[in-house]
Image (tube, grey):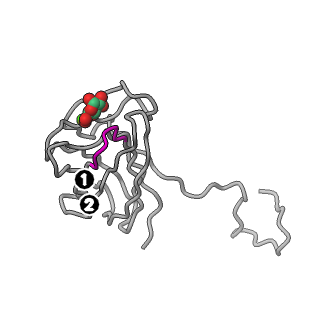
Amino acid sequence: MPYTGRAPDLGAFEQSGDTPPPSAQRYEAETAPAVCQGTIDTNHAGYSGSGFCNGDNAAGAYAELTVNASVAGTATLGIRFANGTGSVRPANLLVNGSTAGTVSFESTGAWTTWTTKTMTVPLSAGGNTIRLDPTTAAGLPNIDYLDVGAMAG
Ligand code: GCU
Ligand code: CA
């Protein structure tokens, strides 16, 4: 690549200034092998991909996605959801079957208003299941996708 910097040319160690930072990997809730205990719906605009998971209104009606990590470590998880009710819809977050935290999916004001909740979770190298398991009879909010960001550690 052409050298454009002012510091000494580091030759083989230089990187292009155009190299983007490692971007998050997106996993859509409607794409296999994801599991949606409910229906894949398209009736609320603003979702990504071809639909979103409308979980059944029941405790334990989960959405589960399988994400890949090249190395074991801590990853940032962005969970995009919409909650058009006035009530919070809490869920346990399980990674490979173990509880890794709880998520309180607050009201977003409308089913067409989508927002992203960020969590940090431990991932193993290879495939990892991420399950959102609602703890109240209201079930999950509508789930659009998971973004898995850069690993640390
Ligand atoms: C409405 C809405 C659904 C949502 C559901 C719920 O029916 O249209 O998208 O999933 O409420 O309360 O969970
Ligand atoms: Ca629902």
Mark 2, Cα crowd under 10 Å, few <14 / some 14-19 / many 20+, is some
Check whether the beta carbons of the residues at disc 2 and disc 1 lie within 8 A of each other: yes
* Residue 54 appears in the picture as rendered: no
Q: Is residue 9 above or below residue 41?
A: below
Where residue 100 appears, x then y in whole percent?
25, 64
Kindly indicate the quadrant of the structure image that contains residue 51: top left
Indicate the secondary structure of the residue bearing disc 2: strand
Q: Where does label 2 land, which residue?
A: 102
Residue under circle 1? 90
Q: Residue at x 44, y 46 (%)?
A: 115
Magenta segment boundaries in residue numbering = 82-88
Residue at the front extreme of this rendering = 86
Residue 85: quadrant of the picture: top left
Write down the quadrant of residue 123 in the picture: bottom left
| In front of the other: 152 or 16 | 152
Residue 69 badge: none
Q: Residue at x 35, y 45 (%)?
A: 107
- Split into 4 quadrants, where in the image is the C terminus? bottom left
